[in-house]
Structures are given as structure tokens and as C-alpha cells.
Image: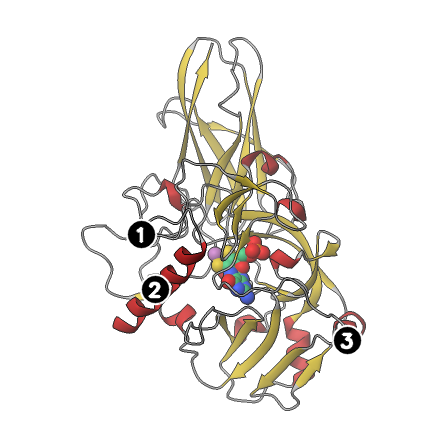
């Protein structure tokens, strides 16, 4: 515990020393109320949360598109030393540990020695929408823009592991990128998956995002894609895959990114004693339109629209309420873009009277699970509770 406290104190000191806007409350974040737009290499105007490491949020209006353009795709790194350039000719992806034949694969090997695979999948930060948690929790104060939907192309992790030959008795696989902490004792960003998950045929080592190379800030040249799981597992600038015969005990699995073992809910008055690593994407739906900064007019059609998503179970229906949850109307779902994609919902609304309407949206998945009104956990992870939007009609 003391070690972790020292670790964070060091990080905060290093970041504060380089960031004039850093507050003194220990949170390395910009308040949710401010919306400073910035332009980073290969990116268009994004909302700045922190500069070092870069944390950039996608403006909500970009979610009117089904695929989030690479230049608007959110950015979230934990360590301050990230790659700004790389020589792809000498770059190698190393596969080692409990395998028969350790591999060092070039980009050309990945593109020519394996059958290409592709998937449409939503990447969503576990802390997306954290700024809306009540009571407030520490951490990056994201609104809804720490997510993006993309078409990923690459190689199935299963095929890479088959080439290396996983030995009997292997139980986990770890993934590490080329990013580093500013100081040697900052734990490397390493994530792990169970071997059964790693070889399930869904997990992918991607070299393309929406038909283009992955932007440097999103993890060029390789990013692990773990469909249906929170993006903390989607290791960027991926360079090392290690097969283990033991459970991985690194900081980013054993200390960070954990939720109560009973689910993503706990009470602020009695925090859960047992925690487990966060895993699959919680069922959620959000509003994208109307843009409440623009007037909504009586007797004129207004499109109410948003996105619903989950871990791949599938969205059965999305309902909308105009009276703060008393009555619910079914919305229209757009065609499914893939099991791991988000799903767009729409409702054509013609308000007949003036006033303020309290809209709410809730999704139901194919297993019959329905979003509820209350959810909280100390880390602000996996937001899944019902969104509200107040709309003034004039
Ligand atoms: N190497 C590396 N990979 C990483 C991270 C990181 O800090 N380092 N952050 C993870 C987290 S928490 C998120 S939300 C996603 C963000 O991916 P993006 O920046 O491409 O949107 O990357 C994941 N992969
Ligand atoms: Mo994240």
C-alpha cells in the first residue's frame, strides 16, 4: 500500500512538474466542465484531459457517424514515455514464455504468413462517463467520449499462438507495449488474459483501423483487440506476448482496473472487500442527439438518437421515456454492424406542447437484462445506469 502511495506521489509530481494546469488535489485531470480543444499529430480537434500522458476525448457530435474516424478516436495512455515514431522495418512482435518456438514477427510476417481477419468492435475505456458518477470519484473525468467504434484488421491471436506452439500447462498470456514510465520503478503497462480467452478466435492483433494504419497515438503499429472487453486490455504499441504457467501478478491486473467481485456495483458507505479484474463491457445506452445547445421547436420533428452497446450479447431493444421514466416508448434500431459493434437507435419525436421534457434511455440485451437507474463503484468504471437528458421545447 505504502509502495503504491509513493508510486502515485512520484507520478503526480512528475506530471505536475510538466503540466501548468495540473490541480493540487492529486487528480491528474481537467475538470469535466472545461472543454479545451487541442490538435495532436494525426488528430483533429479533441477534448484535452491531460497532456502527459495524452488523454484525449472524442467530441460527442462525432458519434453521429457509425465508425469513429481515426483522427477523432479517443486516446488514453497511462505512462508518460510513449512512442512518437518507430522504424517498422526493424520492429518485431516477440512471442515467448511457455511456447515450443519463440517468435519474432515482422510487420511483413504478420501480413503475409497469416490469414487476415477483421472485426467491427467498440473500444471503450473502463472509465468512460466517469464524470457523471455521483458521488464523484477520482480519475480522469471523461464524459461519454472515451470510446469509439472501428473496423479492425489483423491476425487472430489464436493463429499466432498456434505458430509458436503453446505448451501444456500454460494458463495465461500477457501483453506489453513499447510505452514506459518516466522512472524505472513505474510498473510497465502489462495486461493478461486467460489462455482460453486468448485462443477463443475473437482476440486479434490488429495492424489496421478503419482501413488505415493505426494512428501513432492509438498504438501504431499493433494493437491488441479484445472484442466485448474494456479497452484497458487493448494494449497498444504491442511488442511482447508472453505465455505463462502461472497467474500474472503485475500492478495493472492486481491493483488497478479492478471491480467488486459481485459486479460493478458497490455502495459508497460499504465498499466491497473482494475485487476482481474488470472484464466485459457493461450494457449501456447514451444520447447523441438532440444537441441541447440548439432549440427544439414545438410541432416540428426532432430526431432523438443515440447508441447502445454491451459485451456482444446483443441489443434486443432500446426504450425512451419523455416523462422521467414513468412511461417508455420503443425506438428503432439500425442494422447491426457486428456483434461487438455499438448499435444505433433512433426515435422521431414531434413535441406537441412547450416546456422541459425529462428524457431517459434504457437498453435491454438479448438475455433480457435491462439497464437500471442506480449504479456506483469507487473507481467510476463500467457505467451502465440510465442516462437522462433535459430538453427544452419552445
Ligand atoms: N501500451 C498501452 N496500451 C494501452 C494503454 C496504455 O496505457 N499503454 N491504455 C489502455 C487503456 S486503459 C485504454 S482505454 C485504451 C485506449 O486506447 P486508445 O488510446 O487507442 O483509444 O488503450 C489501452 N492500451
Ligand atoms: Mo481505459
Quadrant housing residue 37: top right
Helix, strand or loop at disc 1? Answer: loop
Which one is nearer the viewer's eye here, 90 or 241?
A: 90
Q: Are marks 1 and 2 in contact (CB under 8 Å)?
A: no
Q: Are marks 1 and 3 in contact (CB under 8 Å)?
A: no
Residue denoted by label 2: 8
Residue denoted by label 1: 377
Tell me if I can see residue 229 in this picture: no
For residue 294, above or below residue 331? above
How far separated are the C-alphas under marks 1 and 3? Answer: 43 Å
For residue 76, above or below residue 136? below
Q: Residue drawn at (59%, 64%), measured in percent from left and top?
A: 236
For residue 10, above or below residue 305? below
Residue 43 in the figure: left or right of residue 57: right
For residue 159, above or below residue 34? below
Residue 23 % position (x, y): 35, 48
Residue denoted by label 3: 109
Residue 180 in the figure: left or right of residue 211: left
How far separated are the C-alphas under marks 3 and 2? Answer: 40 Å
Tell me which numbered mark, 1 or 3, is placed earlier along the sequence.
Answer: 3
Helix, strand or loop at disc 2? Answer: helix
Tell me which numbered mark, 3 or 2, is placed earlier along the sequence.
Answer: 2
Amino acid at each position: 500500500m505504502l509502495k503504491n502511495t509513493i508510486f502515485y506521489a512520484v507520478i503526480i509530481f512528475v506530471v505536475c512538474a510538466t503540466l501548468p494546469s495540473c490541480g493540487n488535489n492529486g487528480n491528474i485531470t481537467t475538470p469535466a466542465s472545461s472543454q479545451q480543444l487541442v490538435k495532436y499529430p494525426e488528430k483533429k480537434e479533441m477534448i484535452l484531459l491531460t497532456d502527459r500522458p495524452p488523454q484525449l476525448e472524442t467530441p460527442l457530435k462525432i458519434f453521429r457517424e457509425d465508425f469513429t474516424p481515426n483522427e477523432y478516436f479517443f486516446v488514453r495512455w497511462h505512462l508518460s514515455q510513449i512512442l512518437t515514431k518507430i522504424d517498422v522495418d526493424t520492429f518485431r512482435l516477440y512471442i515467448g514464455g511457455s511456447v515450443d518456438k519463440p517468435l519474432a514477427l515482422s510487420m511483413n510476417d504478420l501480413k503475409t504468413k497469416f490469414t487476415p481477419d477483421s472485426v467491427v468492435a467498440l473500444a471503450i475505456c473502463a472509465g468512460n462517463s466517469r464524470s457523471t458518477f455521483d458521488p464523484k470519484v477520482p480519475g480522469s473525468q471523461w464524459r461519454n467520449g472515451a470510446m469509439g467504434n472501428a473496423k479492425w484488421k489483423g491476425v487472430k491471436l489464436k493463429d499466432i499462438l498456434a505458430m509458436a506452439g503453446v505448451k501444456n500447462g500454460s494458463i495465461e498470456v500477457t501483453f506489453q507495449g513499447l510505452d514506459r514510465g518516466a522512472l524505472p520503478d513505474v510498473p510497465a503497462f502489462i495486461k493478461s488474459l486467460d489462455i482460453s480467452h486468448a485462443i477463443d478466435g475473437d482476440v486479434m492483433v490488429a495492424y489496421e483501423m478503419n482501413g488505415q494504419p493505426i494512428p501513432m497515438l492509438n498504438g501504431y503499429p499493433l494493437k491488441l483487440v479484445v472484442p466485448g472487453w474494456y479497452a484497458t486490455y487493448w494494449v497498444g504499441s504491442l511488442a511482447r506476448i508472453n505465455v505463462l504457467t502461472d497467474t500474472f501478478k503485475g500492478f495493472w491486473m492486481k491493483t488497478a482496473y479492478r471491480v467488486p467481485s459481485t459486479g460493478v456495483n458497490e455502495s459508497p458507505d460499504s465498499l466491497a472487500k473482494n475485487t476482481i479484474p474488470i472484464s466485459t463491457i457493461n450494457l449501456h445506452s447514451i444520447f447523441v442527439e438532440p444537441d441541447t445547445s440548439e432549440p427544439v421547436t414545438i410541432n416540428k420533428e426532432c430526431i432523438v438518437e443515440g447508441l447502445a452497446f454491451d459485451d456482444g450479447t446483443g441489443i434486443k431493444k432500446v426504450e425512451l421515456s419523455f416523462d422521467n421514466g414513468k412511461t417508455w416508448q420503443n425506438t428503432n434500431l439500425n442494422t447491426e454492424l457486428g456483434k461487438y459493434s455499438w448499435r444505433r437507435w433512433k426515435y422521431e419525436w414531434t413535441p406537441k406542447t412547450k416546456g422541459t421534457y425529462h428524457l431517459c434511455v434504457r437498453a435491454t440485451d438479448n438475455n433480457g437484462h435491462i439497464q437500471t437507474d442506480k449504479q456506483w463503484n469507487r473507481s467510476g468504471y463500467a457505467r451502465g445506469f440510465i442516462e437522462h437528458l433535459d430538453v427544452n421545447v419552445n
